[in-house]
Amino acid sequence: MRRKTIAVAIAVAAALGAGVAVPAAAAPHAGAPHTRQRVPANAEALRQAIAGLPDAGATAAQVRFGGKDGSWAGTSGEADLRTHRAPKGDERFRAGSITKAFTAATALQLVHEGKLSLDGTVQRYLPGLLPAHYPDVTVGQLLNYTSGLPSADGSFESDLKERFTSWDHRELVQRAFTKPMNFTPGTRQEYSNIGYNVLGLLIEKATGHSYEREVRERVIDRAGLKDTYSPGDAAGIRGRHTHGYQLSKGELFDATEWNQSITWASGDLITTTADLERFTSALFRGRVVPKAELELMFTVPDVPAYGKHEKAAYTSGLTRIELGDTVVWGKSGGRYGYLNGFGATRDLSRTLVYSVNATEAKSEKGTPVVGKIIKAAFGS
């Protein structure tokens, strides 16, 4: 990930109206390997990747690596800058856009059951949601980011003013529809949240149940995840968790408490690295999505990326990443103070889950820690 140098030496920063000091970095802690599991050869590289936290770009990190060569889990930094509590590796965090993989898995199950059709249109299922002058947009196009739907504008400052606002889900998506379509549906690919929030509405329409219930029963419970949930309108995070800190105007702001209804089906989940590791295994092994529909999660549409001289890289819920000779499939996600990801080779010979509490998680600056973790895990 690209990152401009953060020219900020943070000694004391503000969070929730009070000072938050960034302490000296502590050595990363490696968790005990699973019983009879080998320690992989890249364990030291992974340890070094998260060494030196907290720093100006990140306050904490949790990492899990697995596969045929063994497993490793480690943490670094401080989960809470006020108490200087070190993360133990099982802290919850805001998953951000990793939620999209769960939403896609739920929608694809409904496709398998005939409750939704990939060629079915939003106009058919949810009449009146899209402006009358918009062209037909299909379920399949929502899933693989080729819908052309515009996105609402936003920034940290504007989001901050509304961080305790509870959004109506239909209003959430319609606020973007004062704009024209970005492109003809099916001709380009543009990553955005809007399509997945529309999918949330479609899931509710097709089942008669809440989006949260369907994701819980169809994905979270099926994959055996114990610490993953949709928070609804609750601004806090249940149980032990890492705090997320956002750098704004040279100061750190504790952004942990935040109503996530503004992201809903595109980014509201709370989870742990262990749960995401279980989810990766269950998903890739076909225990969550039926085989035919699962292939859509490993199929990139043959269209160019919108506004870029690049090919499409996103599938229905996942991302295809080439790292040298290795192809990794996974999903990243960010909320203010949280930058996370999971990825694996298709055969699960190498798997990676990470959560880094980056102080500029929603900008291109990010943190070099993530790139170091990925390089240590996949060798590129």
Image (cartoon, grey):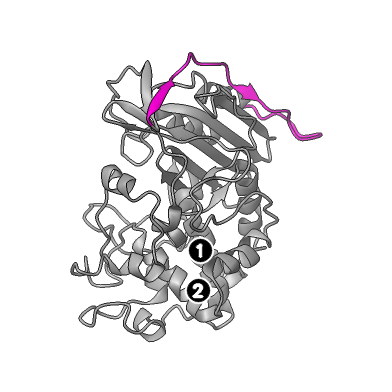
| Structural distance between the alpha carbons of marks 2 and 1 | 9 Å
Evaluate if marks 2 and 1 touch, with contact meaning CB atoms under 8 Å apart.
yes
Q: Is residue 353 left or right of residue 38?
A: left
| 32 is within the stretch colored magenta | yes
At horizontal 63% and vertical 33% (from top left) the residue drawn is 89
Q: Quadrant of residue 17?
A: top left
Residue at the disc numbered 1 = 103
Residue at the disc numbered 2 = 203
The magenta span reads 17-41
Q: Main secondary structure of the magenta part?
A: loop
Q: Which mark is residue 298?
A: none
Circle 2: residue type: Ile
For the residue carrying disc 2, how many other residues have a C-alpha within 10 Å: few (<14), some (14-19), or many (20+)?
Answer: many
Q: Front-most of 8 and 44?
A: 8
Task: Say if residue 15 shows up in the picture.
Answer: yes
Q: Position of residue 110 (x, y in %)?
A: 55, 76
Q: Position of residue 92 (x, y in %)?
A: 59, 42
Q: Quadrant of residue 134?
A: bottom left
Q: Position of residue 31 (x, y in %)?
A: 69, 28
At horizontal 33% and vertical 76% (from top left) the residue drawn is 137
Considering every residue shown, the one lying at the far top of the view is 24
Q: Position of residue 171 (x, y in %)?
A: 34, 68
Figure check: 124 above or below 62: below
Please count the marks in the image.
Answer: 2
At horizontal 48% and vertical 42% (from top left) the residue drawn is 340
Considering every residue shown, the one lying at the far front of the view is 17
Q: Secondary structure at mark 2?
A: helix
Pointer 2 or 1: first along the chain: 1
Circle 1: residue type: Thr
Q: Front-most of 266 and 145?
A: 266
